Image: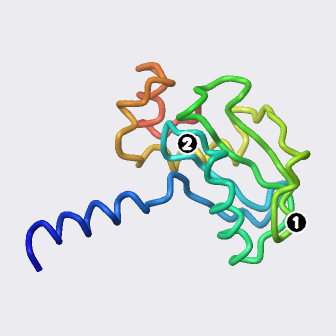
């Protein structure tokens, strides 16, 4: 394999990496947590998220953390109903999740290890420092 082919293969793989991570909760109100791993709009990934949820036989309420796109504000968390095949598009709404909630703590824990978090403009330095220390924001 030539170096050019190797680089093309490597870059192609990076381009196919999902911009989100799904954690299956299985207890409480939410069936799964979807954490956006980029500053891009997570709603552009809905078809892929639906496929992954369907493959894992998940249904119920799903919460999406869009922190890296929206920042730590009232538009951070989105909840929606997934029927096992697709999202009910009319069920999407912003929700507030308290700082001490286990879902929020899990999301912050996942984001703590996310590469490139320092380049996210939606978070200020203090918020980034809290994430790196493993604290919930």
**Residue drawn where x is 56% and y is 46% of the image:** 36
Circles 1 and 2: CB atoms closer than 8 Å: no
Q: Residue furthest left?
A: 2
Of residues 116 and 49, the one drawn nearer to the viewer in this rendering: 49
Task: Residue 136: give its label.
Answer: none
In the rendered image, residue 137, in percent from the top left (x then y), is placed at 59, 30
Q: Residue furthest right?
A: 90
Q: Identify the secondary structure beneath mark 2.
A: helix
Separation of disc 1 and disc 2 at Cα? 27 Å
In the rendered image, residue 60, in percent from the top left (x then y), is placed at 86, 62
- Which residue in the structure is indicated by mark 2? 108
**Which numbered disc, 1 or 2, marks the residue closer to the eye?**
1
Q: Is residue 30 above or below residue 4?
A: above
N-terminal label among 1 and 2: 1
**Residue drawn where x is 66% and y is 42% of the image:** 104
Quadrant for the N terminus, please. bottom left
Numbered label tally: 2
Q: Identify the secondary structure beneath mark 1.
A: loop
- Which residue in the structure is indicated by mark 1? 83
In the rendered image, residue 122, in percent from the top left (x then y), is placed at 51, 24
In the rendered image, residue 51, in percent from the top left (x then y), is placed at 68, 69
Q: Is residue 34 above or below residue 95?
A: below
Of residues 13 and 73, the one drawn nearer to the viewer in this rendering: 13
97 left or right, relative to 81: left
Residue 22 sits in quarter: bottom right
Of residues 117 and 90, the one drawn nearer to the viewer in this rendering: 90
**Residue drawn where x is 80% and y is 45% of the image:** 79
> What crowding class fits label 1: few (fewer than 14 Cα within 10 Å), some (14-19), or many (20 or more)?
some
Residue 30 sits in quarter: bottom right
**Residue drawn where x is 84% and y is 43% of the image:** 92
């Amino acid at each position: 394999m030539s170096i050019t082919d190797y680089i093309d293969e490597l870059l192609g793989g990076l381009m196919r990496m999902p911009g989100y991570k799904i954690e299956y909760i299985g207890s409480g109100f939410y069936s799964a947590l979807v954490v956006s791993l980029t500053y891009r709009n997570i709603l552009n990934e809905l078809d892929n998220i639906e496929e992954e949820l369907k493959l894992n036989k998940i249904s119920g309420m799903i919460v999406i953390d869009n922190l890296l796109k929206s920042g730590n504000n009232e538009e951070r968390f989105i909840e929606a109903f997934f029927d096992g095949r697709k999202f009910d598009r009319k069920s999407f709404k912003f929700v507030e999740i308290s700082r001490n909630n286990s879902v929020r703590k899990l999301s912050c824990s996942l984001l703590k290890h996310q590469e490139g978090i320092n380049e996210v403009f939606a978070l200020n330095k203090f918020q980034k420092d809290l994430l790196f220390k493993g604290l919930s924001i």
